[in-house]
Every structure is written in C-alpha cells, then in structure tokens.
Image (cartoon, rainbow, N blue to C red):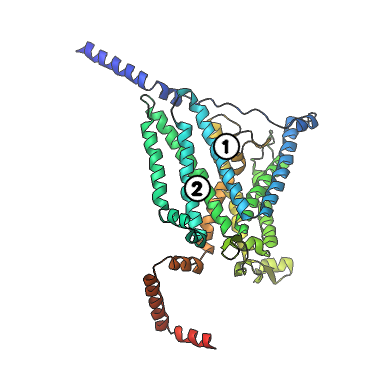
Amino acid sequence: KTDMRHGSDNELKAEKDGVSDSESKVDSGVPEVPVPADDTPEVLNKALSGLSSRWKNWWVRGILTLAMISFFFFIIYLGPMVLMMIVLCVQIKCFQEIITIGYSVYHSYDLPWFRTLSWYFLLCVNYFFYGETVTDYFFTLVQREEPLRILSKYHRFISFALYLTGFCMFVLSLVKKHYRLQFYMFGWTHVTLLIVVTQSHLIIHNLFEGMIWFIVPISCVICNDIMAYMFGFFFGKSPKGCCKTWEGFIGGFFSTIVFGIMLSYVMAGCRYFVCPVEFNNDSNSFQVDCEPSELFQLQDYALPSMLESVTGWTTVCLYPFQIHSIALSSFASIVGPFGGFFASGFKRAFKIKDFANTIPGHGGIMDRFDCQYLMATFVNVYIASFIRGPNPTKVIQQLLALRPDQQLYIFNSLKAHLTEKGLLPALEEAAAA
C-alpha cells in the first residue's frame, strides 16, 4: 500500500512536471526580451560624440522633441480628419509594440495564431468603435447612403459576430500542455485592447467636441513631460540626472498650470479650435464653424481680496474655458504621470528600457503616449460630467430616422406638453410678430 502511494505520488509529480514544463518556465522568472538597438541617426552621433552620455541623451531628446512638436503643429494645420487618422496610426503602432513584447517573451513555444488573432481582435474592436463614432457624429451622412445605412442598422450584431469568430478561432487553437500560456496571451491581447484602443477612441470623441479639447490636454501632458525633465535634469539631486525627481514633479506642475492657461487664452478666441466637427450636407464635406458657446466668450471675474491686494485689480477678463484648463493641467501634472509610472513598471517587469526604438532618445511610440491615454479618459469624463448637455441636433437626427407615424406622435405629444406649460401660445405670437 505504501509502495502504491509512493508510486502514485511519483506519477503525479511526473505528470505535473510534464504538463507544466512550459508554464513553470514562464512563472519561474522574468522572460528575456530582446533589447532594441540604438538607432540614433549617425549625423547626431558624430555631432555629439565629444559629449558625455548624459548630455548626449539630453541633446538627442531635445532635438527630436522639437521635431515632434513641429510635426504636431503641422497635422493640426491639416485639420481634424487628418488628426483622426494620426490617432489611428498611433494606436496601431502602440498595439504593435506591446504585442511584440508578448510575442518576444513567448515566441519559443510555437503557439498557433497568436499574432493573427491579436491583429484580428484589433480589427474587430476598431470596427465597432469607429462604426459607433461615425453613426453618432455623422448620422446625416450615414442615412443618405444605402450601404452605410444597412451597416449602421446592424452594426452591433456584425461587430459581435466578428468577435465571436475570433473567440471560436482561439478555442480551436488551444494546444495541450500550453493551455495556461495561451490564456495568458489571450488576456494580454484584451488588456492591450482595453488600454490602447478604448483610450484612442475617447481621444477621437474629444476631438469631435472641438479641437481645443484635443490640443490643450495633449499639450499639457507634453509640457509637463518636458518641464519635469528640464527641472529634474538641472535642479534634481539624483546622481543619474533622472527627470523623475521631486524637483521635476513640482517644477512641471507649476509650469503646466501657467502653460495651460496661456494656451487656452490663445485658442479659445478662434472658432477653428472651439467648434465641434460636423458634416455639411450642402458642401458634402466636414466643417468646423459655429457660433462659439459661452464657454469661449470673454467674461469678467471678480478676484479674491487676497489677490486684489497683491495685483491691484478688482476683476480679470477670462474665457470660462481657462478655468477648466486649470483642472486639465492639474490632472496632467499630478495624475497623468502615473500613466508613465505604470508603463515604467511594465518595462521593468520585462527588463527592457523602452517599448521600441522608433524615436531615438525617446524609445517607442508607446513611451511617448503612455500618459496621453490616461489623460484622454479624464477629458472625456470631464466633458460628460461638467460640459456637455443635451444636444438638440442629435435629438432631431434620431427623430428623422423614425417612421412618419412615430414622428407625428412625438409632435403631438410635444405640442400638448408646450400647451400645458403655457409656452406654445407665446411661441405662436412671437412667430406671428
């Protein structure tokens, strides 16, 4: 009996060793990820060859930062549709960088369809989100075109069917002795989709509310990142000159607040930046033109007695949006960096310095946008909570999609409601006058 028990224990141990050999390989330590090679342009390497690595990195980061800011201004000039395409390209590149890390970690296990399924799920999620956006913001265009109207009507069913196909493909791809590993990668893909695709979708929603809701938050994050690095580099006490210091954090905070207020003042007076993106049926094109709301009209604000005694001013003339920009700047300075800390922890977990080597001195695209995704969610929630109200245009669009008898029912109900409130006679008299 004892021999049988020992035999069964040995068989169980051998079975566990055999089944979980690959899994223990994953769990026992940190997998190795190839370190991206330094792809700094040879021109910069030669020009900065006499500097120490600390100052060489400073100049490389500075030059490439100016180049990226210039490109940012250029795509703003090209308009909201180009900005939307750039957001999509950035999203795809960030997804590729994260998925590549997963593939590099687990490539030796010969798992079927991992990359194929990852990109397929990306396609499905983008189809769902962009379809929702087009239907929501460009309803008139969708209703005018028969193919778009059909796709819009059955959009969610088509999206679910596409995802269900990928789900079935994953189940069929399961390989014995690699179940846990494959579910790790399934979760890896979906968390990446949650972080990257969902947030980029929110960025596009912010953009359609007016380019100022896209440019100011992104610029605040960029400003905080640059100023935190500068203050940390020149005033930080870290021997490595790291930008993640208290000096950098505090300096970046105050610099970003001032920058946000100034940038908002410049942009709030321009219709091109404050008007929502809309589709014009007459010109068959997208336009950015409207009568600015009260949020973008100068108003006088009384100063607190403390500031009045210091400045000598009793009132100050500001755009209401500038006050909201303080909240956006504060989030970009205080909470936004935690997106970067999260990304740093992720990279340390896999012993890599950067997600990729796309931008010399900066790393991959994900290294530059790790804080932007967190900021996008906050801006979208902020607009929904404190800015956006009922939209009459969208209500009318939905009414026009109803059957004539349904439209007539709503008309009679609304007429009865206005009559009961005593508003309809007044409106009729005003129309007659």
Going by the numbered disc 2, the residue's amino acid type is Thr
Q: Nearer the viewer, mark 2 or mark 1?
A: 2
Could you tell me residue 142's position as x and y percent? Answer: 49, 58
Which type of secondary structure does the marked residue at label 1 adopt? helix
Q: Which residue in the protein does label 1 denote?
A: 344
Residue 315, disc: none
Binning the other alpha carbons within 10 Å of mark 2 as few (below 14), some (14 to 19) or many (20 upward) gives some
Binning the other alpha carbons within 10 Å of mark 1 as few (below 14), some (14 to 19) or many (20 upward) gives some
Give above or below for 199 relative to 16: below
- Which residue is painted at 54% across and 53% down in the image? 378
The one of 426 and 143 positioned closer to us in this rendering: 143
Going by the numbered disc 1, the residue's amino acid type is Ser
Could you tell me residue 204's position as x and y percent? Answer: 55, 53
Left or right of residue 364: residue 198? left
Give the CA distance from mark 2 to mark 1. 21 Å
Give above or below for 106 relative to 362: above
Give above or below for 293 relative to 117: below
The one of 60 and 408 positioned closer to us in this rendering: 408
- Which residue is painted at 46% across and 32% down in the image? 114
Residue 198, disc: 2
Note whether residue 254 is visible.
Answer: no
